[in-house]
Image (cartoon, grey):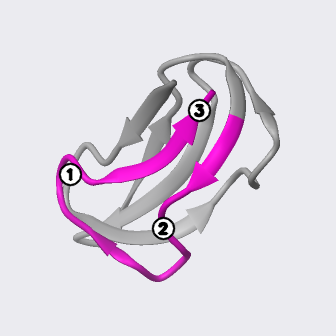
Amino acid sequence: MNEVKASMAGSVWKLVVQQGEEVNEGQDIAILESMKMEIPIPSEASGSVKELKVSEGDFVNEGDVIAIIE
């Protein structure tokens, strides 16, 4: 089980995947918006999205868990 974490503080602009979806290592999970910049958050492992811990519009801090990949 791998946790995908926010690389910086920002708002969750868009979730690119849904719970249960298969993802590959390096595939974007979410896009954060910070200081009018879009920051893609990639998966660090291949697998299935077990759980999304955030919703679009949520604010996250650096290190917050965005998703769990199984």
Query: Up-down: is 52 above or below 26?
Result: below
* Residue type beneath disc 3: Ile
Residue 23, given in percent of the width and then of the height, sits at 73, 28
**Residue 61 falls inside the magenta stretch:** yes
Query: Up-down: is 37 above or below 36?
Result: above
Which residue is label 2 attached to? Answer: 54
Question: How far apart are the two marked residues, 3 and 1, measured between alpha carbons?
Answer: 20 Å
Q: Residue at x 53, y 40 (%)?
A: 68
Magenta range is 49-70
Q: Residue at x 49, y 61 (%)?
A: 53
Which residue is label 1 attached to? Answer: 8
**SS for tag 1?**
loop
Question: How far apart are the two marked residues, 2 and 1, measured between alpha carbons?
Answer: 15 Å
Viewer-closest of 40 and 55: 55
Query: Up-down: is 2 above or below 10?
Result: above
In the rendered structure, the answer to whether residue 1 lies left or right of residue 58 reads right
In the rendered structure, the answer to whether residue 17 lies left or right of residue 53 reads right
Residue 60, given in percent of the width and then of the height, sits at 28, 67
Label drawn at residue 57: none
* Residue type beneath disc 2: Val
Q: Residue at x 26, y 54 (%)?
A: 64
Q: Residue at x 51, y 47 (%)?
A: 67
**SS for tag 2?**
loop
Where the C terminus falls, by quadrant? top right
Which residue is label 3 attached to? Answer: 69
Q: Earlier in the sequence, mark 3 or mark 1?
A: 1
* Residue 49 falls in image quadrant: top right
Q: Earlier in the sequence, mark 2 or mark 1?
A: 1
**Residue 53 falls inside the magenta stretch:** yes
